[in-house]
Image (cartoon, coloured by chain):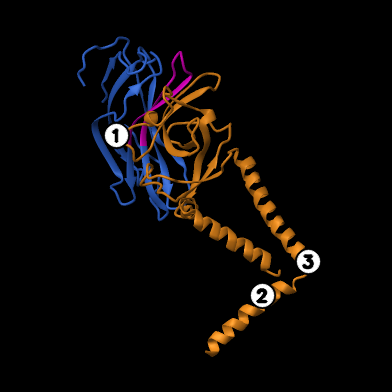
């Protein structure tokens, strides 16, 4: 009974804290929050510039590159024009008209003197190459379809992103808690 | 060591299809000089605690009138840490069709076959390494129409 009373007092204290924050402090907290969000965005944009890729970090969504990569692994990409596409490289690409990026390995390349290149890809764990995945009538991929080349990776960490996608309630819950924490935290 | 037969067919436009059979001898772990076809001199300790697997692939590189640079993977293999690091494969047929984009294989004197691999770590950078040993293969000037493969 005493423990319950103590808990009730603590929660009241917490609410009191919030009420005691006057308008100025509230604005300050909101600005703080804005700064954190802006910094995060700046870091992301900075990464985009340094790597040359529109999406420098991607999560592996399928098992088509097992046993090297599994669903939920995080890949770090670069997409520098000076790095030519060569066979054996792991590329992340998008098929025209589709949003989902695919992570597979380059199987064949044919490059012209002027640098125009067309290439074919295949998932390590797939029996056939990706021609079946491309658009109807499309036999090759080109530089413009490439999001980046995989240069490094960390396992498992991307699972959070997949969870948030598959269970939107989870995403909202995480965002809500984060927002609440930042707004209420005094420092 | 290798046999070349050409066939003038293709599922899309008519393009050259090459057939190559090959032997691979490689000592990935120690880099000792084995029987030459491909040998690796640089990998003192290639399978350390952070290496999950190696993705090996045999690629053919050549140039044609149509395209300044062509690379085609003929064969690949995943070698997990713990697998036997010595490869001694004989008379292998290519896993993937060796189609050219056009008719550039006929009479092409210089097709270079190289063994390379992608080191896949448990976490970290993904480097591509090329083995030190390559073979140059010429294709004949005529086509063969027998399907003896």
Q: Chain of mark 1?
A: B
Residue A76: x %, y % from top left:
52, 45
Q: Which residue is mark 1?
A: B24
Q: Colour of chain B?
A: blue
Q: Residue at x 32, y 17 (%)?
A: B10
Task: Name the residue that disc number 2 marks.
Answer: A15
Instruction: Say whether disc 3 or disc 2 marks the residue closer to the N-terminus.
Output: 2
Q: Closest to the observer: B32 or A9?
A: A9
Front-most of residues B129 and A29: A29
In the picture, which quadrant includes the C terminus of chain B?
top left
- In orange, which chain? A
Q: Is A40 on the left or on the right of B110, as rendered? A: right
Q: Is residue B68 magenta?
A: yes
Is B101 in front, or is A97? A97
Q: From mark 1 to mark 2, how far is it between C-alphas?
A: 73 Å
Please state the extent of the stretch shown in magenta in the rendering: B57-76
What mark, if any, has residue B113 been given in the picture?
Answer: none
Query: Residue B105 vs residue A168: left or right?
Result: left
Q: Helix or strand or loop: what does disc 2 sit on? A: helix
Give how far across and how far down residue B76 sits, in percent: 33, 36
Instruction: Report the mark closest to the observer, 1 or 2.
Output: 2
């Amino acid at each position: 009974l005493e423990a319950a009373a103590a808990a009730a007092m603590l929660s009241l204290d917490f609410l009191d804290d919030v009420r005691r924050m006057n308008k100025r402090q509230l604005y300050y907290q909101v600005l703080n929050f804005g700064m954190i969000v802006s910094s995060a965005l700046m870091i992301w944009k900075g990464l985009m510039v340094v790597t040359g890729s529109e999406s420098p970090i991607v999560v592996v969504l399928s098992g088509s590159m097992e046993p090297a990569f599994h669903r939920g692994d995080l890949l770090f990409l670069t997409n520098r024009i000076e790095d030519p596409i060569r066979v054996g490289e792991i590329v992340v690409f998008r098929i025209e008209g589709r949003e989902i990026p695919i992570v597979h390995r380059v199987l064949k390349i044919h490059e012209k003197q002027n640098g125009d290149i067309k290439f074919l890809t295949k998932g390590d764990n797939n029996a056939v190459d990706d021609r079946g995945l491309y658009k109807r009538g499309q036999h090759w991929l080109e530089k413009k379809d490439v999001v980046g080349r995989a240069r490094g990776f960390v396992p498992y960490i991307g699972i959070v992103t997949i969870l948030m996608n598959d269970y939107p309630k989870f995403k909202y819950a995480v965002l809500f808690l984060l927002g609440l924490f930042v707004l209420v935290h005094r420092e | 060591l290798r046999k070349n037969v050409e066939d003038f067919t293709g599922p899309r436009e008519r393009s050259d299809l090459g057939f190559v059979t090959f032997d691979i001898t490689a000592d990935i772990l120690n880099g000792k000089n084995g029987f030459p076809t491909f040998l690796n001199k640089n990998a003192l300790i290639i399978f350390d605690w952070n290496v999950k697997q190696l993705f090996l692939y045999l690629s053919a590189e050549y140039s044609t009138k149509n395209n300044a640079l062509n690379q085609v993977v003929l064969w690949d293999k995943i070698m997990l840490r713990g697998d036997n690091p010595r490869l001694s494969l004989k008379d292998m047929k290519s896993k993937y069709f060796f189609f050219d984009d056009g008719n550039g294989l006929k009479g092409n004197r210089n097709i270079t076959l190289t063994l390379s691999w992608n080191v896949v770590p448990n976490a970290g950078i993904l480097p591509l390494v090329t083995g030190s040993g390559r073979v140059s293969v010429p294709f004949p000037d005529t086509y063969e129409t027998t399907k003896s493969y």
